Image (spheres, grey):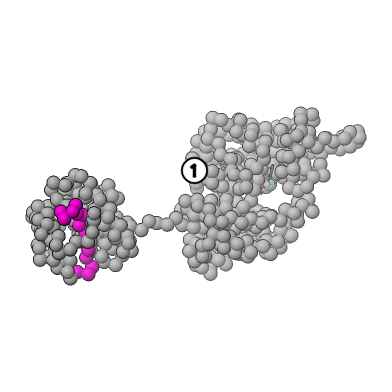
Amino acid sequence: MIELMSEKDLDQVVEIENSAFPNNPWSRAYFLKEIRDNDLSEIYVEKQGDEVIAYGDLWFMFENCDLTKIAVKRDYRNKGHGTRMLKYLVNVAKHHGCEYMHLEVDVNNIEAVSLYKENSFETMRIRRGYYDNGADAYDMVKILIEAKPRTVLAIESSCDETACAIIDEDLNVYSSVVTSQIDVHARFGGVIPEVASRMHVEQISTIVKEAINQAKIPLKDIDAIAYTIGPGLIGSLHVGGIAAKSLAFFYDKPLIGVHHLKGHIFANELVRKLKYPLMALVVSGGHTELVYIENDQSFKIIGTTLDDAIGEAYDKVARVMNEAYPGGPVIDKLAKVGKRHYSLPTPKVDGLNFSFSGLKNAVLQLVKKEETLNNPLDKNDLAFAFQEVALNCLIDKTKKALEQYPCKMLVVAGGVAANSRLRKLFEENFRNIDLVLPPLKYCTDNALMIGCAAIHYLKNEKFVELSAPSLASMSIED
Ligand code: KG4
Ligand code: ZN
């Protein structure tokens, strides 16, 4: 049992002291003074019955705690009593609110030095001739405060989702709120930029407030504010940007401008830790890109679409079939019951680039032809045909990319990564590489993905000024 030392332990403690530190022991009078008069000192003893077998002394000086000594009775050495006493004293210091514990130890006292090292004390410097006998001492320190992971509030408003999320460096998710304008834009068959910006203005304050309320973390305790700086619809980006900047300015927080596609890519970290070099296939409404990522700050586009993005092609093909916006989920559903019936041409593009406008036009021509011939259009079969061709292009180019740029991991990112057939085909075709597909609800735009990316910006200290402009187009390589 370990307890505070009392005067009745004095004789035994002095005896251990003389045997443990024969060159410069503390005197009986000194110990007495320590326990009677020194309010800043506490001596603890470990006892078995009335027998003292170890003791340790602490001095408290504001945020610092000095461990002046630990001693173990001769017969009890090397039985873990030193470690037990040290751990106990560290806890005492933590309870006192100390931020670090400091000690000096004779460099020749190998046992003591290794005890401290094993308990995460670090050597700060050597004090030459510190002891009366001329021996050197190590100055050692242990940090007692456990650094809390930093939190980020992230805002996404690049297209037709207004979203806010709070996440910390250890990827603990405190909140993620998304509101979509899809219902409104569906009436027009696509996103109307002016309508989107106005709706962001209406939603943004409520969404940010909701994310803060759900997280139950006051804004003053958030460590950084992040937002999507680009690419996207400029009016929409501005709304999220202004909201983020207002919070950063008012609460004096660092500001992080996140590239939207990095958000899509880093959302995969919600599944597992990313390994580099990493290949990312970004498939969204605005982008189709193969990105070779050497580390979290080095992005190289090795393949891109020469015309339409794949998500855009899904949306347009759905429109040709008189289906609702967004077309991706609709085609996904129709194709599930479709069969091999229509044949569509495979786009021919050299290298690692993509092209989907030819495929989209082929669908349009096919629909027109069937109309002219008065043939009923089987939407399920057409969705199936389009999807097989489009997805096989993705697989083919991704395989080629991995041959040219060997990687430890492959991630798929962006709205189209929600596609059920894509997920199945990728799992079947990429068994030889660590493949990560984002959780379904984080495939399409959300703020949590912006938070995941923002954590990398925070660790790399990449911040932006309040004057930073939002950018409608922006390369992931910058
Ligand atoms: O990433 P995202 O939410 O927004 C952009 O950054 O563009 O992606 C939206 C795109 C839309 O084109 C939508 O049709 C497509 O993702 N999408 C899908 C599916 N769910 C969404 N495409 C195919 N299958 C899906 N299940
Ligand atoms: Zn997106």
Q: Position of residue 267 (x, y in %)?
A: 56, 47
* Residue in the picture at 65% in, 36% down: 422
Q: Position of residue 265 (x, y in %)?
A: 57, 45
Is residue 455 or residue 310 the one in the foreground?
455
* Residue in the picture at 51% in, 42% down: 272
Q: Quadrant of residue 403?
A: top right
Instruction: Note whether ligand 2 is within 8 Å of mark 1.
Output: no
**Which residue in the rendered view is the most extreme toward the front?**
49
Is residue 137 or residue 52 the one in the foreground?
52
Asked whether residue 64 is drawn in magenta, I would say no
Q: Is residue 46 left or right of residue 307?
A: left
Q: Main secondary structure of the magenta part?
A: strand
Residue linked to disc 1: 273
Kind of residue sitting beneath label 1? Lys
Q: Is residue 372 left or right of residue 254?
A: right
Whether residue 302 is visible: yes
Q: Position of residue 388 (x, y in %)?
A: 71, 33
Q: Position of residue 33 (x, y in %)?
A: 14, 68
* Residue in the picture at 67% in, 59% down: 236
Q: Quadrant of the N terminus?
A: bottom left
Whether residue 71 is visible: no
The magenta stretch is: 38-51
Is residue 245 or residue 187 the one in the foreground?
187
Asked if 317 appears above or below 222 in the picture, the reply is above
